[in-house]
Amino acid sequence: MIVWCGVATVLLAFTISALATPVTQRLAERIGMLDVPQRHKAHVHPVPLLGGCAVFAAILLPSVLAMALARLWSLGGAPGWLPSQLAVHIGGASAKAHQALGILAGAMVLHVIGLIDDRRNLGAWLKLVSELAVCGAVVIFFRVRVLTAAGPTFSVIASILWLTAITNAFNFLDNMDGLSTGVAAICAAALLGAAASIGQVFVAAWLCLILGAVLGFLPYNFPPAGTYLGDAGALVIGYLLAVVSCLTTYVQPGQPFYLYGIFVPLVLMAVPLYDMASVILLRIVERRNPMVGDRRHFSHRLVRRGMKPRSAVLTIYFCTAGTAISASLLPHVTGTTGAVLVFLQTLITLLIVALLEGGDARQ
C-alpha cells in the first residue's frame, strides 16, 4: 500500500507540473517574462521563464493539502476509508507540520527572490546573502541539520554552508536545456531509494513530489527547450534537494552506525558541485567576478569539445547516475576497503568528466 501511495504521489506531482507548465508558458509570453538571448546565452529566440512556478506548485500544493489533512485528522480522528498503513502516520505527519511549513516558507522566499531576479537582475551578491539568510533561518529555527554529533556550532555552520552550496549548485547547473531538471530527477530518485529503504515516510513523500514535479516539467525543458525553470525554479529545486538530503537517514534501523554514510549526499551531488567549483575556479583564475554568468560551465565545455548540446546533457545525466549508484552503495559499506572503493569510483567518474571536457575552456 505504501509503495502504491508513493507511485500515486509521483503521478500527482507529475500531472500538476505537466498541466501547469503550458499555462505558465502562455502567461510568461503575455507578461513578457522571457529569457532574451544576450551575451552568454546560447538560444536564438526568447524563451518563457516561468516554468519554475509549475514545478513549485506541483510540490507546494500537495504538501500543504497533506499537512492540513494530517492536522485535521489528528484532532478529529482519521476517516474510516483511510488505509491503516497510512492512518498510523497521521500523528507523526501532524507533529512534523511546523517544520515542514518552515521549510516550505523558505522555498517560497527563494521562489519570490528568483522571480524578481528573472524579471530584473538583483545582482549575484544580493541573491547570495538572501540564500544564506533563508538557509540560516531553516537550520536555526527548524532544525534542518547535518553532522549533529560534531556539536551544535559546527553543525549549524556546516548545515548553512551545505544548503547554500547545493542551492547554488543547481542554479549554476541550469545553464543548458534540461540539465538541472534531469540531474535533479536522478538525485531525487537516489534519495528516495535511501529514504524508502529506511522507512522515512515523510521524507520519501516529499521526494516523490520533487521527482514527479521535475519529471512533469522535463519534456518541456529537454533540448530544445520550450520553457525554462528560471532562478525561481532552479533555486527552489536545489534548496529542497539540499534540505531532504539533510533529513534523510543513511543507516538501516538496528544496524551499527558507520561514518561513511554521512558522505552519501556529497557523493550523490558530486557532479553539480564539480560544475560549480570548476566554473568559480576558472573565473577566479581569469580575475573575473565568480558570480557573473558565462559559458564556461561543464556542459558548455563538452559542447566546445565537439558534443551536441543534447549529447552533453545526456553525458552529465549518466555521470550523475554513476555517482548516484556510488552514493546508494555507501550506506551498506561496513569496512574501510569498501568505502575507499566507492570514493574511488566517484573520483574516477569526475576524472572521466575532466578528460571529456579537457582543453582550453576559452575556445
Image (spheres, rainbow, N blue to C red):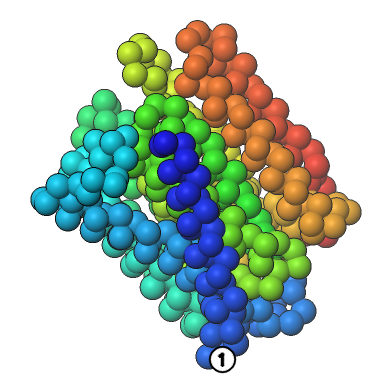
Q: Quadrant of residue 260?
A: top left
Quadrant placement of the C terminus: bottom right
Q: Nearer the viewer, residue 204 or 99?
A: 204
Q: Tell me residue 338's x, y (percent).
A: 57, 12
Q: Residues within 10 Å of mark 1 (few under 14, many from 20)?
A: few
Q: Is residue 291 above or below residue 74?
A: below
* Identity of the residue drawn at 59% across and 55% down: 215
Q: Tell me residue 91's x, y (percent).
A: 18, 41
SS at mark 1?
helix
Q: Is residue 30 above or below residue 158?
A: below
Q: Tell me residue 16's x, y (percent).
A: 50, 65
Quadrant placement of the N terminus: top left
**Residue 129 falls left or right of residue 98:** right
Q: Nearer the viewer, residue 243 or 305?
A: 243
Identity, as a three-letter code, of the amino acid under mark 1:
Arg
Q: Report whether residue 37 is seen.
A: yes
Q: Determine which residue is flagged by label 1.
A: 30
Return the residue found at the far front. Answer: 80
* Identity of the residue drawn at 23% across and 45% down: 80
Q: Is residue 169 above or below residue 126?
A: above
Q: Report whether residue 301 is seen.
A: no
**Residue 47 falls left or right of residue 111:** right
